[in-house]
Amino acid sequence: EGIAYSALSANTVEVVSGGNYTGDLVIPASVRYEGVDYSVVSIKKQCFYRCGLTKVTLSNSIVSIGSSAFFQCADLQDIVLSNTLTNIGSSAFYQCSSLKSIDIPTSVSVIEGQAFGECSALESVNLPSGLKSIPINCFAGCVKLGNIKIPNTVTAINDNAFVNC
């Protein structure tokens, strides 16, 4: 379906290229290549950079989203994150200007800087319990952000995390 994968180990792969993918996309839990099944565990940095995706659903095998993975996906309106996701890379959803809400699963322990920066339509965010800090510029420029649930486990809100909100 135009998605490229690269082997990480004998039985795992990461999504390395989404090409010019548009519309709705479900990242599968596994792929088969030359008779071998591989578990899809991550999305590489800049994988879907400036793509035309409108909805992304991550299978429950995904544990990591790389830096700038969905950078400037202006049409992305909905993202369903996996319940096994632990890490959201820096600028992963930077300038996803159609994204209105995000529900981050409790499995996420690390959100890196600018992960949701400049998401100008973002109105609502549900952060996971267990999250310890909100990184620098995480929601910078999210001008419509009016509803955010910050768990009591957060002990640090870094510089400019909510600047220009």
Image (cartoon, grey):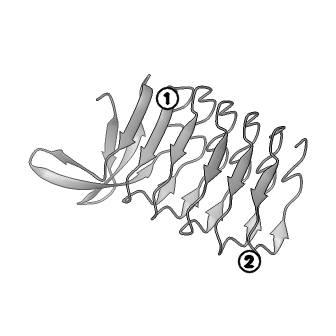
- Kindly identify which residue carries mark 2: 153
Secondary element at tag 1:
strand
* Residue type at tag 2: Thr
> Which quarter of the rendering shows the C terminus?
top right
Q: Residue at x 52, y 51 (%)?
A: 65
Q: What separation in Å lies between label 2 and label 1 (alpha carbons)? A: 33 Å
Above/below status of 10 relative to 3: below
- Residue 72 lies in quadrant: top right
Secondary element at tag 2:
loop
> Which quarter of the rendering shows the N terminus?
top left
- Camera sees residue 11: yes
Q: Residue at x 37, y 53 (%)?
A: 59
Quick check: 98 left or right of 78?
right
Residue 98 image offset from top left, x and y in percent: 65, 30
Above/below status of 58 relative to 120: below
Quick check: 157 left or right of 34?
right
Q: How crowded is mark 2: few (under 14 residues within 10 Å), some or many (20 or more)?
A: few
Q: Which is more N-terminal, label 1 or label 2? A: 1
Q: Which residue is drawn at 77% across and 62% down?
A: 134
Q: How many labels does the image show?
A: 2
* Residue type at tag 1: Leu
Mark number displayed over residue 53? 1
Quick check: 29 left or right of 67?
left
Mark number displayed over residue 41? none
Residue 35 image offset from top left, x and y in percent: 9, 48
- Residue 121 lies in quadrant: top right
Residue 116 image offset from top left, x and y in percent: 70, 45
